[in-house]
């Protein structure tokens, strides 16, 4: 079934959900199987979890209503293909899913079902933890040594990813439990900050971006090159071990509660879950669920709900499982973050490397508590595949609680006024005719030196933390300085001091803020060579290639000077560097040939070094905030929250995502909201951005 047809069928089923009957069961099964294939095998789902859950529950209800038993139905098994690129194994015991609900009131029904089985009125105690939106993983340890790591797959059979799992820092290679064999299960997640970094790099190189951190985690764990897995900072949280075997036979747990269960996993060396709540009864549980639904916790990884389990492990064995889920646990999912809205128009955005990206301008809509008016469509091939038109009603989703994305159009509601979206022929910024290389998806503007949008993007990339590391020269500030004529190219950054008095005269620029910007620029003059290559924004040169190139050039320094080496690099010699591909080698040579004059001037301003140390990492700077914790809330002019976090961390501070009595400082911007109110109630010290700069200045 073609994706466009599948999406149309899905939309139709969702819009007619209450009218579906026995005749729709086969279609529901077929549609769900296709979505399972996209989710588990392709890692490219085209609908939200909420939509899938509605279809799944509808199919389940219809099968029960009409007495249909089909062992091949998606409600009984996840029938997906196993990739041939990894060795296939059987799980020691089936990895079944959790039953789930989006309704707080269903928790009462959950307890009712438990009581019907137990035939008891005793008070039930619960443990509740986060529902990670990641990739299920099963680890097998033999005599304390990790010997096998399997993805979840269809619950029975899937892929051996042991080599890649060993690259995840939070997965111990050895555990302090020396049974003959033990299986430990948990979830692999990708930090949202890392997800954004990966997608930014993929978009800059014209690669297809990941739709959400969960898919990125899956793709990262299933790499043929384990070094890619190692570079992506995946994290693992353990939540169970279904069996342990000793020389005497199957080992019985000597613990009685799920809280003790998690403590035992922590003692093995696994990362402690960041949230666990104990409820003495169902009322306490409901109150906490309601509280977190209204004030959803924020972490640097995706969560889509809460997992509720009976705390008494003895009851787990008594209750057992169905074919699909355990009876002693249920997942409560937060309100859906995908909604329907209208696509008003398309904005053709120009990136720093000249790549043109279609951005959907939307009729403003609330998605998960945030008003969204823009969403990404990634590239024109993706736009065409999804069949989106201007004027369409579309589904959008906030992937990773951060990036709004258009899922696809709702074709059935079209009225004939919609317009086909065609890629631009000329650059929206400078009017130059656009280019698309053979075999590439990206459409780009070749006028790198004269395109205003590329100038802005290049300067922002140059100042980025992995480039020149100018932490206080934020994106908005760069745009303001370009508009004022203070910045025109890389070299102009190092002449900003000449405009000090003019900058201070601008609204929002006080003396301390300007001093911090200039100090950050001065600190960047002694730039590591690898960071220098990244800062230049050479197409296809990211952090990894920057390091490889720096190593190669450093080895040549004794023979020739830096300038001489850079301006005489050849395609043939670069191609001999391991992991530098022919296209990348060509891009590097072309860049230095075309930008010789600019780089010559820049090398009078900066002094590339051959160590990885930055002035920002000196002990004097790093110790300023040691032992102090910070939380940042609200929006800020001229600097992003991520940049403020970096500034705090580079000065030794700890960044937290929530406000508590133990927090030292809350940094507030515009629209600070509930965190500021809570900080005032708890007596936490509140600072604005200027006061933070002054604190650093001390």
Image (spheres, rainbow, N blue to C red):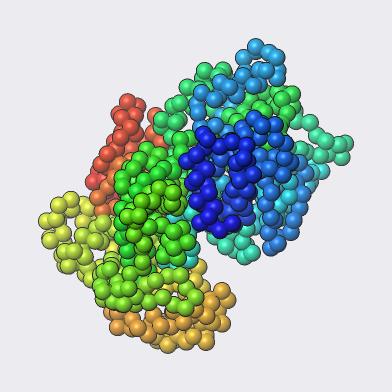
Q: Position of residue 293 (x, y in %)?
A: 44, 31
Q: How many marks?
A: 0
Residue 201 falls in image quadrant = bottom left
The front one of 82 and 594 is: 82
Measured as percent of width and height from the top left, residue 422 is found at 36, 66
Q: Residue at x 34, y 34 (%)?
A: 675
Relative to 558, is 147 above or below?
above
| Residue 616 visible to an observer of this rendering | no
Location of residue 447 in the rendering, given as x and y in whole percent from the top left corner: 31, 77
* Residue 578 as seen in the image, left or right of residue 405: right
Which residue is painted at 21% across and 52% down in the image? 512
Residue in front for this viewpoint, 353 or 27? 27
Residue positioned most to the top:
121
Q: Which of these two is toward me, 28 or 247?
A: 28
The reply, left or right, for residue 73 in relation to residue 494 is right
Screen quadrant of the N terminus: bottom right
The residue furthest right is 248
Q: Residue at x 44, y 41 (%)?
A: 337
The image position of residue 129, as x and y in percent, is 56, 33
Residue 209, placed above or below residue 145: below
For the residue pair 132 and 13, the one nearer the viewer reads as 13
Looking at the image, which residue is at 72% across and 40% down? 70
Location of residue 467 with respect to 71 vertically, above or below? below
Task: Report if residue 412 is visible in the image.
Answer: yes
The quarter holding residue 369 reads top left
């Amino acid at each position: 079934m073609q994706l466009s047809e599948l999406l149309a069928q899905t939309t139709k089923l969702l819009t007619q959900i209450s009218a579906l009957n026995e005749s729709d069961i086969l279609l529901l099964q077929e549609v769900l199987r296709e979505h399972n294939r996209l989710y588990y095998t392709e890692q490219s789902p085209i609908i939200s979890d909420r939509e899938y859950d509605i279809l799944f529950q509808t199919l389940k209800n219809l099968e029960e209503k009409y007495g249909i038993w089909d062992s091949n139905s998606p409600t009984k098994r996840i029938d997906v293909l196993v990739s041939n690129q990894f060795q296939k194994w059987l799980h020691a015991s089936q990895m079944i899913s959790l039953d789930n609900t989006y309704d707080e009131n269903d928790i009462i029904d959950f307890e009712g079902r438990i009581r019907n089985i137990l035939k008891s009125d005793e008070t039930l105690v619960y443990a509740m933890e986060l529902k990670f939106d990641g990739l299920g993983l099963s680890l097998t340890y033999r005599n304390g040594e990790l010997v096998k790591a399997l993805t979840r797959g269809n619950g029975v059979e899937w892929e051996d990813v042991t080599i890649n799992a060993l690259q995840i820092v939070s997965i111990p290679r050895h555990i302090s439990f020396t049974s003959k064999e033990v299986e430990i299960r948990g979830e692999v997640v990708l930090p949202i900050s890392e997800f954004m970094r990966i997608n930014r790099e993929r978009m800059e190189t014209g690669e297809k971006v990941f739709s959400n951190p969960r898919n990125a985690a899956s793709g990262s764990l299933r790499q043929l090159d384990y070094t890619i897995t190692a570079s992506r900072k995946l994290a693992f949280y353990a939540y169970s071990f279904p069996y342990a075997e000793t020389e005497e036979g199957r080992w019985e747990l000597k613990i009685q509660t799920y809280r003790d269960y998690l403590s035992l996993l922590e003692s093995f060396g696994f990362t402690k879950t960041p949230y666990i709540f104990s409820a003495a009864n169902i009322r306490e549980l409901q109150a906490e669920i309601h509280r977190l639904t209204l004030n959803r916790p924020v972490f640097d990884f995706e969560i889509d709900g809460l997992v509720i389990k009976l705390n008494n492990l003895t009851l787990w064995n008594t209750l057992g499982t169905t074919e699909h889920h355990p009876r002693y646990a249920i997942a409560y999912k937060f309100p859906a973050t995908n909604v329907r809205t209208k696509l008003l128009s398309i904005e053709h955005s120009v990136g720093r490397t000249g790549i043109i990206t279609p951005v959907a301008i939307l009729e403003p809509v609330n998605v998960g508590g945030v008003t969204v008016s823009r969403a990404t469509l990634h590239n024109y091939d993706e736009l065409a595949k999804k069949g989106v038109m201007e004027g369409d009603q579309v589904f959008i989703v906030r992937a990773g609680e951060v990036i709004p994305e258009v899922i696809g159009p709702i074709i059935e509601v079209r009225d004939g006024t919609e317009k086909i979206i065609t890629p631009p022929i000329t650059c929206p910024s400078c009017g130059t005719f656009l280019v698309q290389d053979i075999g590439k998806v990206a459409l780009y503007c070749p006028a790198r030196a004269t395109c205003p949008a590329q100038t802005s993007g290049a300067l922002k990339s140059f100042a980025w933390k992995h480039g020149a590391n100018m932490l206080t020269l934020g994106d908005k500030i760069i745009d303001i300085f370009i508009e004022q004529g203070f910045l025109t190219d890389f070299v102009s950054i190092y002449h900003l001091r000449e405009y000090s008095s003019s900058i201070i005269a601008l609204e929002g620029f006080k003396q301390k803020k300007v001093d911090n910007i200039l100090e950050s620029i001065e600190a960047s003059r002694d730039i590591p060579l690898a960071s220098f290559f990244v800062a230049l924004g050479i197409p296809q040169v990211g952090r990894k290639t920057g390091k490889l190139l720096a190593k190669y050039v450093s080895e040549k320094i004794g023979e020739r000077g830096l300038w001489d080496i850079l301006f005489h690099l050849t395609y043939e010699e670069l191609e001999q560097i391991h992991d530098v591909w022919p296209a990348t080698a060509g891009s590097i040579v072309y860049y230095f040939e075309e930008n010789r004059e600019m780089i010559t001037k820049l090398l009078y301003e900066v002094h590339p070094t051959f160590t990885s140390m930055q002035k920002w990492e000196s002990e004097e700077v790093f110790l300023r905030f040691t032992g102090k914790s910070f939380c940042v809330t609200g929006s800020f002019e001229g600097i992003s929250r991520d940049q403020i976090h970096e500034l705090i961390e580079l000065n030794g501070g700890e960044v937290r995502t929530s406000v508590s009595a133990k927090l030292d400082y809350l940094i507030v911007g515009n629209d600070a909201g509930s965190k500021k109110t809570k900080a005032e109630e708890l007596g936490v010290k509140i600072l604005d951005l200027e006061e933070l700069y002054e604190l650093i200045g001390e």
